[in-house]
Image (tube, rainbow, N blue to C red):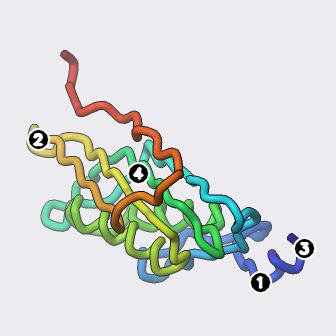
Amino acid sequence: MSEDSYTPLEQLGHQTALPKSPDEAVLEVVPNPHQDAAYLIRFTAPEFTSLCPVTGQPDFAHLVIDYVPGAVIVESKSLKLFLSSFRNHGAFHEACTVAIARRIVEATEPKWLRIGGYWYPRGGIPIDVFYQTGAAPEGVWIPDQGVPTYRGRG
């Protein structure tokens, strides 16, 4: 892979302001360096935040994003900025989790993707949201996401 592959990137290596909203955020991609191999990429965001669309109070989640790339992979700084753009975005847990998955799918056209949104309790009830694009590709090791069900202090 040549350095020319990275030339069109506008965020990596540059000072980049936090997008005001997920709609304004840009997910950048780079060529998959191992298109000949079926492998899994995992992003973990243990401090994801968004806002409740009704109360405006902050919501917190531990996100685990797994995908088997196709021709391109998501550039991680752009993903970090995209996820951070939810800090001032009002949406329910389900809307945030599925929207994140769909944006990554739109940007990368992966062979497979799943996301686990492990949300911390709101009103005493934790909400976990899971989404995937279909059956996992054969021959790819898909590890457990490793996030236990919320148990509070017990």
What amino acid does circle 1 point to?
A: Pro
- Asked whether, in this view, residue 148 is left or right of residue 101, the answer is left
* In front: label 4 or label 1: 1
Q: Earlier in the sequence, mark 3 or mark 1?
A: 3
Check disc 2 and report the residue beneath it: 125
Tell me the kind of residue under disc 4: Phe
**Which of pointers 4 and 2 lies earlier in the amino acid sequence?**
4
Query: How dense is the environment of label 1, judged by Cα within 10 Å: few (below 14), some, or many (20 and up)?
Result: few
> Which numbered tag is attached to residue 48?
4
Q: Mark 4 or mark 3, which is nearer to you?
A: 3
Instruction: Give coordinates of residue 6: x percent, y percent.
Output: 81, 75
Compute the Cα span from label 3 to label 1. 12 Å
Residue displayed at 35% across by 61% down: 135
Cβ–Cβ under 8 Å for marks 3 and 2: no
Image mark for residue 57: none
Q: Which numbered tag is attached to residue 8?
A: 1
Give the residue displayed 73% in from the left and 63% down from the top.
Answer: 34
Q: Earlier in the sequence, mark 4 or mark 3?
A: 3
Mark 4 and mark 1 in contact? Answer it, CB < 8 Å. no
- Residue at image mark 3: 2
